[in-house]
Image (spheres, rainbow, N blue to C red):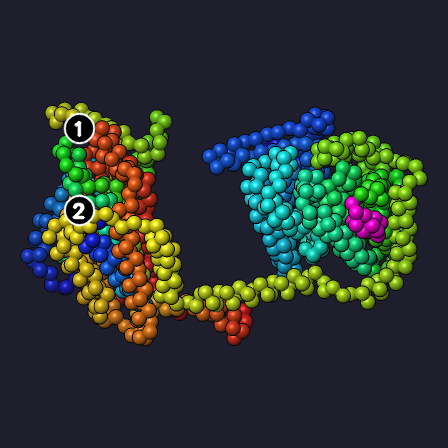
Amino acid sequence: MIVLLAVTVGALYAAGVYLLLQRTLTRIVIGLAVLAHGANLLLLLAGGRAGRAPIVDGEAGRVADPLPQALALTAIVIAFGVSAFLLALAHRSRRQTHDDIVQDDVEDRRIARMARGETHR
Amino acid sequence: MLILILLHALAALTALALGRRLGPRVFLVAALAPLVSVGLLAGRAPGVLDGRPVDEALRWAPSLGLVAAFRLDGFALLVGGLVAGIGVLVMVYASAYFHRGPAVGRAAALLVAFAGAMLGIVLADDLLLIYVFWELTSITSYLLIGIEDQKGSARAAALHALLVTGGGGLAMLGGFVLLGQEAGTYRLSEILAAPPSGGLVGPALALILVGAFTKSAQFPFHGWLPGAMSAPTPISAYLHSATMVKAGVYLIARLAPAFAAAVAFWRPTVVLVGLATMLLGGWRALRETDLKLLLAYGTVSQLGFMTTLFGVGLPEWTFAGAAILLTHALFKAALFMVVGIVDHQAGTRDLRHLGVLWRALPMTAAVAVVAAASMAGLPLLATFPAKEFAFEAALHGGLGRLDPVLAVGLVGGSALTAAYAFRFAWGAFIGGRGAQPTTAKPPARALLGPALVLSALSIALGVAPVLADKVVAPAAQALHADASGLHLALWHGITSALVASAIAVGVGVVLFVRRYAVVRLQRRLQVLPPASAVYARAIERLLHGADLVTGFVQNGSLPIYLGVILLTAVMLPAAHLVAGGSLPQQWVVAETPMQALVTVLTIGAAIGTAVAARRFVAVLFLGGVGYGVAVLFVIQGAPDLALTQFLVETLALVIFVLVLRHLPERFGGSPSRRSHVLRLAVAGIVGVFVTAFALVAAAARTGESVSEEFLARSLPEAGGRNVVNVILVDFRAIDTLGEITVLGVAALGVAALVRTKVDDDT
Amino acid sequence: MTPERSLILHRAVEVVFPIALVFAVFLLFAGHNAPGGGFVGGLVAGAAFVLRYVDGGSTEVRRAARVHPETLVGTGMAMAAITGAVGWLGGGSFLESRKLSIDLPLLGTAKTTTSLPFDIGVMLVVVGLVVMILRTLGSESHK
């Protein structure tokens, strides 16, 4: 309904996905955070038009849908926890390999070589 | 009946706990469960034998339509009685066979657990329940074959058995589901009372037959059974001759009367597979020199025999099948026990090193000779009247082109059976080429006793077939309502069946006398590759195929995995969106000018995160996105959200800084142009799709929001005015509980990642 | 962070820190009827600890929060779960809330519900997470 909001959601998703597809863990974390913002906004958008805050105070008028708000609130805090965890992962990756680049999965590569008959199990 | 199965589970746990303290005597404790089962079945027997089955149903998940239904009818009584009765004898035998060791408690526990699962198969009246117990027997069998887990061959044999029977079990599950859907019920008794005839019944039965054939070691799946002989002998005696391998036969017996005539492929398939197995197994048994392997191939052969008999699905045949099922369990369990005694007392079970054992082990020899004679089908022993009945049915005809095949096949198979039975008894006990009278110690009473009981029963049922008739006739009637009026008899007069019996035994004697010529002929006729080689090749191919598939779909690059997942996640709903979505009727560009301004700024910040080359700059842009979204929350009427978002964004910024101070200033690595374009394309597709989705989703509401209810109930029921908070801590508090669990785990994860020392070798 | 700490910052944080904590508790209690609640309260309290961190690094955080962050997280989850289990008493369902009203001498009647301890649990978990991050990722000893 609100076109600009929908476009914003789309832009956040696009930016998030673009970052998610990178190999630097920091960019992946940032991408995830941008994606989370987009998802929260989408949730709210699905609730309908804007309105007064959903606080019961006896006044009349359009009230915004509280359920998507509760869902989004949960999602915000979870995204925070996940970001913290991923950053700790980046931190550790830095300490261990001196960079935060996500390498190709070594096991997967080994199986692919096996399938081509280059190595044996 | 459920209580019986629970009792077995309890006995298994007890045996596991007491194994170390009691040693092999723990088997006697475990034997209590099957012993109680024998008592309980005997208590119910009078009514069941009169044709009044006992039903029992426990509705354990009614909302899913899952009912734990059990049914004790004549056939279940016969098979269940064998499972429990032989279970008691085998466990007594095992208490003398095993030596004290760490695996004894485990063996006893698994054996009694298996007995419970097997009883479950027999008593269950629900297809899915049968499947569960079926797989339980596969798993316990796997663990029991591999009980000597330090032996590589035992582990390989166990895996072979598990893969074949487990794979068959999966096919069977598919068949069960198809059959259940087609019939509208999963109750076996209801399906058999009114067999469905829809188009899926054929495929369903074909899948179920695969399961039954694998479990009952039918050609071409028979290879696992001889391999399973690497298990200790009591286990082979119980699982791989008397009970588990009969599960497939049991299922065929149940289904055949309802479907043999209605489904075109059933009768030829089951009969030909059964006959082929019978002949192949018997033929191989003539060559083996290991007594246990000889019996294993004999078991394969006999299972083929039973599959054939039950597979026809006509009353006389079903009756003959039930009779053979009983007598086979008696003689084959006894023979396995005898092999165990020989192995135990003489130190070998190789026919080439054994001979004239009757001098050293007279009682054991007597038991063995009686059981072998019963197997051969000699008169006055239990199998003779049963076999007569089978020949009678075969010569009676009425099955068209299958008639001659059946007659020749059954007589030929019986001749082979007689030949290897003679070879077993003569080679080890009476004569024997090894002919060194082995100095064997007499066996313990607990070793010999159970086999003695079984052979005595073989004689009793042979002399007085009326006794066998008392359980076999109700069993056949439970399977086939038209089977009433059929009875076993000692003497039918000089009939064509008697002639057939005589021919079978006669040919058997000839094959036995000319046994060396037979072995030479076998060597020359070796055309089919051995089943074990086929299995090994199949496994090798399977692994190679798995490598190929894995190598193709999993090339190790995380961005590629993500890209595929994202595109798939977009494609499927996008198709729906194009086909069925409708755009909103009224378009509003923005609620307020302020909103328009903030959206533009947010989008700009989002682009900034994507293009920034420095880490700090990207994080600052991310903060911009977060604060922008928070302002949008305020405009939308969500103060709680906005407050949270502001705080989270601030804290997140701090954490990013904490980590980034250790990382290089710029992002490393410059991707190739092609992968860059690909990333942009995926991102663009996702963005466009999500925009369209957001527009359509906002217009798609058809019902009233549940929030109306939340708004109405919040103050009076939950005592709170802030509806968002009430939803979080009251209406949907379980979600919140789950969420703080995630937060707690994240906190512990952070601590673990940062605090643990870095390994130097990685 | 830096060896020589800013005195002005130090004094400012000393004043603001307790106020922020009181404000966090206020938000927690107010949350049932006005914007606020356990999440927001927890985040504000977490922000207060960030101020202490800015003032004096992870050692300062350690001084401010004497308990282990694991204890905070564990206590919070336990409180939430136990509140849920209380719902079972008297035949209710898991996490079913009850209204309570307590007569306090002089102060009058205090009305609350059993979802308050649940929200306190949420707050403790959030604070625990923030403190945990400050004490681990914020620590200087790992470099």
- Residue that numbered label 2 is attached to: B636
| Gap in angstroms between the C-alphas marked 2 and 1 | 33 Å
- Determine the main secondary structure of the stretch shown in magenta: helix
Can you give x and y, in whole percent of width and height, for residue B234 in the image?
Answer: 71, 47
Label 1 residue SS: strand
Q: Residue at x 87, y 62 (%)?
A: B516
Q: Residue at x 33, y 31 (%)?
A: C87
Label 2 residue SS: helix
In-image side of B213 versus B62 (left or right): right
Cβ–Cβ below 8 Å for labels 2 and 1? Answer: no
Compared with B438, B683 (above or below) is below
Q: Residue at x 32, y 64 (%)?
A: B682
Q: Chain of mark 1?
A: C
Can you give x and y, in whole percent of width and height, for residue A119 in the image?
Answer: 52, 73
When asked about the image quadrant of residue B70, the answer is: top right
Can residue B747 be seen at all in this image of the molecule? no
- Residue bounds of the magenta highlight: B399-413
Q: Chain of mark 2?
A: B
Query: Mark 1: which amino acid?
Result: Ala
Can residue C82 be seen at all in this image of the molecule? yes
Can you give x and y, in whole percent of width and height, for residue B440 in the image?
Answer: 82, 52
Extreme-left residue of the structure: C8
Q: Nearer the observer, disc 2 or disc 1?
A: 2
Q: Nearer the viewer, residue B151 or A34?
A: A34
- Residue that numbered label 1 is attached to: C110
Label 1 packing within 10 angstroms: few (<14), some (14-19), many (20+): few
Q: Nearer the viewer, residue B151 or B296?
A: B296
**Residue B410 belongs to the span the image colors magenta:** yes
**Residue B124 belongs to the span the image colors magenta:** no
Q: Nearer the viewer, residue A31 or B238?
A: A31
